[in-house]
Image (cartoon, rainbow, N blue to C red):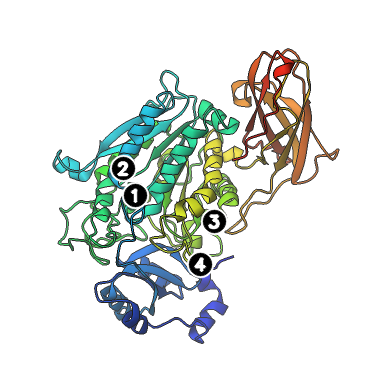
Amino acid sequence: MRKVARLAFLAIIIGGLIGGAVSLPSRTAQGQIALTEQDLAIWRVQVSSPAEVTRLTSGGWDVLEARGDDYLLVLGDTATAKELEAQGFAVAVDQALPSERPAGLFSYFGGYRTVVEHYQHLDTLAASYPGLVSVVDYGDSWRKLQNSATGHDLKAICITNQRAGDCAQNPATDKPRFVLMAAIHPRELSTSELAWRWMDFLVSRYGVDADITALLDHNEMWIVPVVNPDGREIVESGPTTPYTQRKNANTTLGSCANPPTGSSQYGIDLNRNANFQWGGAGTSTNPCSLTYRGTSGGSEPENYYLQNLLSSLYPDQRGPNLSDTAPLTTTGTFITLHSYSNLVLLPWGWQECFGEACPPSQQAPNDVGLRSLAFRMSYFNGYETGQPSEILYAASGGTDDWAYGVLGVASFTFEVGPTSGTCGGFMPPYTCQDSMFWPKNRDALIYAAKSARQPYTLSLGPSTITPTLSLTTTTPGTPISLSAPINDGTYGSFGIAKPASQPIAAAEYYLDTPPWAGGTPLPLSAQDGTFNSTSEVASAQIDTTGLSLGRHTVFVRGRDAAGNWGPTTASWITIIADPTSFVYVPLIVR
């Protein structure tokens, strides 16, 4: 387990720092080799107490969403490093950022897509899949509000098997919603690419993959691929390498560097500007600081319109007090993508607990369900899990805190990408999107989407791994053997306060009509004779007598000893009239 903000409580680490056990290269020596005065770098800044963490994150420096056991990471030029040293921090180079553009595969920094391309992609999907995809213009960016000829519309996409009234901005719907958003910090290039792949995956697997088809039949997937398009446009305008613009394009406050530098830029940090617990830990009042919080919570149009969008998609399911718990019947899941550090973060982000685990008084009221869902997702991507102050640092005014704090939605941040290795660092090669980031996170996103029906209860129940069917195509009356692994141990291995796994107590399947729609439960039995382990294989014989010709959906789910049912997993069987046309179709494995 990685020690993070809680290192102040561990004397052995502090003693190691004092005794010189940690040996980092000097900034000067590395700077002479790798950096000019103008070059940007990621700097390791050693911290040895909670007070130093707070001093650094609240000092206006560009502290990244990544860290080590005894240091935080700050983006800046050599002037930034000198400022940090003048404030008493020990500083060393962690990574020099690229000073030239790699050869482009498509359009931008080795293949990353521009705002224009992302918006074209939304329109292409809508034109190619009119029964699945709707594009929504939900507001205007700061630049567009100043001059309609510049700036951008703020766009989202809704993907579902559309009925009349679907994809409406109305919280009164029987289709639970999963919202994925990216690039609120525009320089975090990987996030929009992950959103791109999620959209393509959903539309391409509909009608091909039973589980994804069932997901889109019964849920709505909303994606905002570029929350901060003005800021991304600034990032794209770097002449040799992307500018490291973190904020929006608001130029009305302060006298800041233009073009942006590692220590000064115009704009407001939109992930410090949400109007829930605004203005606290990890924010700055300096307009040129990269964590500038703005003049008030929700002051920026990108946040104002985003909060309106989320309020139009999710019902308000939590009371006004910080201690109010969202009910177990709450619907909706939400993930905001950031980079980098391989983390799954859960609310509260604004709390400063600096311990091995935040005490109950500094946990979200729905911590049990939030933490269980976070660890379920980290089972798939292998990321470390916890509240920001437990494994990173505290930050207030974030979107995930707003979505949970105001609406009660199960909300999370993914920090995508490792800090080291061939796909590590702040601006990883574009090829890492397909080789690492997408395959690591795909199944975590599927789990989040499935859990949207009732996240605070479904995440407590076991996972159903892809079922096996003896036949996928048969004639009426021919039995089909069904077996499905049911596992309550699907929690990630790294993080704070990992939930305990429960023994499996039951499993059942449904034909065509799922449990939430009033389907008839049909029991599965433990293949070894007794449900008594945290991982079981459940089996049954499906009686196909009387089934109509055509394709039928089999929904499978399991229950643990505490009475919690997990999400369903879907498979298909097809009934045909002519036995001569019998075809065995192997189960599709994603």
User: The residue under label 1 is which amino acid type?
Assistant: Phe
Between marks 2 and 4, how big is the CA–CA gap?
A: 38 Å
Q: Which residue is mark 1?
A: 106
Earlier sequence position, callout 2 versus callout 1: 1
Give the camera-side residue of 351 and 347.
347
Q: Nearer the viewer, mark 1 or mark 4?
A: 1
The answer to whether residue 398 is above or below residue 129 is below
Q: Locate residue 481: give its quadrant.
A: top right
Q: Nearer the viewer, mark 3 or mark 1?
A: 1
Q: Position of residue 269 (x, y in %)?
A: 29, 54
Q: Position of residue 120 (x, y in %)?
A: 31, 37
Secondary structure beneath dot 4 equals loop
- Which dot marks residue 383? 3
Earlier sequence position, callout 2 versus callout 3: 2
Q: Does the residue at mark 2 contact the one at mark 3 (Cβ under 8 Å)?
A: no
Secondary structure beneath dot 3 equals loop
Between marks 4 and 3, how big is the CA–CA gap?
A: 15 Å
Q: Does the residue at mark 2 contact the one at mark 1 (Cβ under 8 Å)?
A: yes
Q: Which residue is mark 2?
A: 117
Earlier sequence position, callout 1 versus callout 4: 4
Q: Nearer the viewer, mark 2 or mark 3?
A: 2
Between marks 2 and 1, how big is the CA–CA gap?
A: 10 Å
Give the camera-side residue of 240 and 362.
240
Give the camera-side residue of 342 and 376.
342
Q: Locate residue 513: give its quadrant.
A: top right
